[in-house]
């Protein structure tokens, strides 16, 4: 059964305008630029959210000129957004510089291109650099930006957007941070995790802190446990090289999954601003008890074998292009974490993330404790009623609450009812803007609230480093251990079953 929420003020709010600025996209020919960055800018343009005086300059080694770049991006936008209406107005904001980001000599051409668009459009010295390149290039680019003078602003601001992964362990993340900080200050660095730009992620905070009925029950007295799922139905595609060096914990747990946990668990910040929110998220990480690593304990790792996804047969991880046949890289992880503070002591947070799961789903599900006794006379052995509140981030953004209700009729029969709130439907926006769009606007507005601070990254690595090290030093006993299209290895089911719980259906 489903119930829809009514919304009084439908539509998209415009928000405050951004200052005129120039965006430089390093890695302008890559997947991220084609699939997310440029389509997000295009969406912002169409919704009238980009500053009127705005230009984006693509930079990569491809021997393109600006006309070719616009053609390439037009194709990318059509693929990603399904249409390229109003393209010409948007295309006039794009230009391209061909160059090698690791070659200091190629920055003079970039500087000239920035000056050209600034003087043509009357843009003050506001420039942000988005590093959509392989992470090994991050330090060289920042060094070159510093040496070429491009990182310095005499009449405006300079900002730096850094993609994940931020380091591959605590030590390398610290080293990277040190190198970035030689040129940019912490208040200029935007470490991006696009999950945080999702409407539902922010709504998790609004839901908790703007509805007085939720906060009083948001603790160990009323919540039995929390499940966080980041499941993908896709495999690794053409990214074998990246994935072999990364694996699921570095790729998903260190950033997305832990971020979601922090947002579900943090204390009410004094204000909704960057410092207050980031202080509270850092405190959650501080209180996390690292999972035990002795034999048989959590975490659980997995790798997919061949199987069936969406009705089609798919290869196992070891048979993917570019993956060595004996690879021990995990494509699935599940773990139980606890947060040692007053609010959450003894409440398990179960996290799972994997590739080639039965479907794409990202959600944070709060499982409340059951009713204290069986007042409605359920037969012996039937579970008592409990409600579940799930924040869904992907594929549809929304909030779902399962509660118990009486089935109409002469008998007192209690049935689960599902209350469903979907963003797109409820607010009457065709589709919520993609997460990257909001985050790019935040960069233009100088709002770091939804970006990771250096200490957050450091603590997150501190939690996951021991897991990765243990797994890398001890090859798995049996890989692959789950078939593509299934919900993960049996050990993950067991992880909850031994505490009398089970995962939500995927
Ligand atoms: N794709 C995603 O969904 C995604 C999601 C989250 C984070 N990220 C992160 O975003 C970054 C980019 O990912 P991606 O998937 O877009 O990678 P990609 O498809 O391999 O693209 C990399 C881009 O960098 C350019 N490039 C490489 N070496 C260069 C150099 N020396 N000088 C100038 N340009 C250079 C490449 O173009 P040329 O060959 O023309 O130089 C290409 O445009 C990575 O750090 C990745 O971890 C990606």
Image: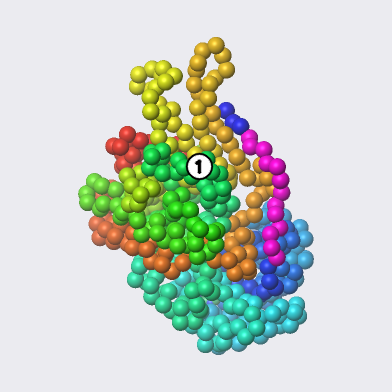
Q: Quadrant of the N terminus?
A: top right
Say whether residue 6 is magenta: yes
The secondary structure that most of the magenta stretch takes on is loop
Say which residue appears at 46% left-offset and 77% top-offset: 180
Tell me the element at label 1: loop
Seen from the viewer's position, the closer of residues 460 and 378 is 378
Residue at the limit of the structure toward the left, as seen here: 295
Say which residue appears at 67% left-offset and 38% top-offset: 6
Q: How is the image coloured?
A: rainbow
In the rendered view, tell whether residue 21 sits above or below residue 395.
Answer: below
Seen from the viewer's position, the closer of residues 253 and 391 is 391
Residue 321 visible in the picture = no
Seen from the viewer's position, the closer of residues 91 and 416 is 416
Q: Position of residue 167 (x, y in %)?
A: 41, 68
Say which residue appears at 60% left-offset and 87% top-offset: 108
Q: Write down the quadrant of residue 4 in the picture.
A: top right
Q: Which residues are magenta?
A: 4-17
In the rendered view, tell whether residue 330 sits above or below residue 274.
Answer: above
Location of mark 1 (residue): 214
Say which residue appears at 41% left-offset and 67% top-offset: 455
């Amino acid at each position: 059964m489903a119930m829809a929420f009514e919304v009084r003020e439908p539509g998209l709010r415009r928000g405050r305008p951004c200052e005129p600025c120039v965006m430089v996209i390093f890695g302008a020919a890559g997947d991220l630029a084609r699939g997310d960055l440029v389509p997000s800018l295009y969406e912002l343009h169409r919704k009238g959210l980009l500053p009127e005086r705005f230009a984006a300059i693509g930079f990569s080694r491809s021997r393109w000129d600006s006309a070719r770049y616009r053609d390439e991006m037009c194709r990318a936008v059509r693929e990603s957004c399904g249409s390229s209406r109003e393209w010409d107005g948007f295309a006039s904001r794009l230009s391209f510089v061909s160059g090698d980001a690791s070659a200091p000599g190629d920055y003079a051409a970039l500087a000239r291109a920035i000056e050209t668009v600034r003087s043509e459009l009357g843009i003050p010295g506001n420039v942000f650099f988005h590093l959509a390149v392989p992470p090994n290039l991050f330090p060289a680019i920042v060094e070159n930006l510093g040496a070429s003078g491009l990182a310095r602003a005499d009449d405006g601001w300079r900002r730096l957007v850094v993609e994940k992964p931020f380091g591959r362990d605590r030590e390398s993340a610290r080293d990277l941070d040190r190198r970035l900080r030689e040129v940019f200050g912490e208040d200029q660095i935007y470490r991006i995790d696009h999950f945080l730009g999702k409407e539902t992620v922010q709504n998790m905070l609004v839901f908790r802190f703007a509805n007085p009925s939720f906060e009083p029950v948001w603790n160990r007295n009323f919540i039995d446990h929390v499940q966080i799922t980041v499941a993908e139905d896709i495999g690794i595609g053409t990214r074998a090289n990246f994935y072999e060096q990364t694996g699921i914990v570095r790729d998903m747990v260190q950033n997305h999954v832990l971020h979601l946990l922090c947002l579900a668990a943090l204390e009410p910040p004094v204000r909704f601003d960057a410092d207050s929110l980031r202080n509270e998220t850092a405190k959650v990480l501080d209180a996390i008890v690292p999972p035990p690593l002795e034999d048989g304990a959590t975490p659980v790792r997995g790798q997919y074998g061949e199987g069936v996804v969406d009705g089609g047969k798919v290869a196992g991880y070891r048979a993917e292009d570019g993956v060595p046949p004996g690879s021990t890289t995990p494509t699935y992880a599940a773990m139980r974490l606890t947060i040692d503070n007053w609010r959450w002591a003894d409440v398990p947070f179960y996290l799972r993330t994997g590739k080639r799961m039965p479907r794409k789903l990202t959600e944070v599900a709060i499982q409340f404790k059951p009713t204290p006794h069986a007042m409605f006379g359920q037969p012996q052995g039937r579970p008592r009623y409990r409600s579940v509140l799930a924040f869904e981030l992907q594929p549809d953004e929304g909030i779902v609450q399962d509660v118990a209700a009486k089935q109409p009729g002469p008998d007192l029969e209690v049935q689960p009812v599902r209350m469903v709130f979907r963003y797109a439907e409820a607010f009457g926006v065709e589709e919520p803007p993609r997460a990257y769009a909001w985050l790019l606007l935040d960069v233009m507005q100088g709002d770091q609230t939804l970006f990771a601070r250096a200490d957050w990254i450091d603590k997150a690595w501190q939690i996951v480093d021991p897991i990765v090290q243990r797994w890398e030093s001890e090859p798995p006993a049996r890989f692959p251990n789950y078939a593509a299209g299934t919900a993960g290895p049996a050990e993950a089911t067991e992880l909850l079953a031994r505490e009398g719980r089970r995962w939500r259906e995927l």
